[in-house]
Image (cartoon, rainbow, N blue to C red):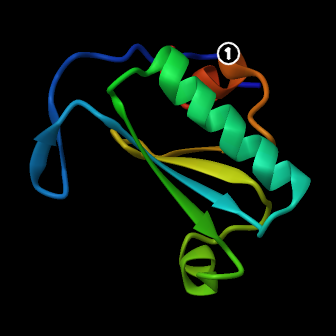
Amino acid sequence: MLENVKKTTNIKQKHNGVASEKNVFHLFVAGKSSSSAKAIVNIKAICENYLKGKCELKIIDIYEQPTLAYEEKIIAIPVLIKKFPLPEERVIGDLSNPEKVLKGLYLI
């Protein structure tokens, strides 16, 4: 996966003009597929177990909101995008390995 891991800081950054310490994630899924369902369960578990109170999650179904998928240039599903703090990072797959997900998002 990714070799170099950036260290996170406690510095407050701004998201939509508001100071925030939360991680903002967008999870793109495709309807009720099994891989989409697994990804939803897995990211909710990661948020609960590793990012308690520091996580905002938006789940986006590409069938219901195809314009958002197009705007984000989504080419694989499911995909988790860390929107904040910057830089934006992406992890593709069912998110079943919390350590790889957190490393891929540069959160550990």
Does 31 appear above or below 16? below
Q: Seen from this angle, which residue lies furthest bottom?
A: 67
Residue 84 falls left or right of residue 19: right
The image shows residue 73 at horizontal and vertical percentages of 63, 71
Residue 16 visible in the shown view: yes
Residue 105 falls left or right of residue 17: right
Q: Secondary structure at mark 1?
A: helix
Q: Nearer the viewer, residue 16 or 55?
A: 55
Residue at 59% x, 81% y is 65
The image shows residue 53 at horizontal and vertical percentages of 32, 26
The image shows residue 40 at horizontal and vertical percentages of 67, 45
Q: Quadrant of the N terminus?
A: top right
Q: Which residue is mark 1?
A: 99
Residue at 53% x, 16% y is 49
Does 50 appear above or below 55? above
Mark 1 burial class by Cα count in 10 Å: few <14, some 14-19, many 20+: some
- Report the amino acid beneath label 1: Glu
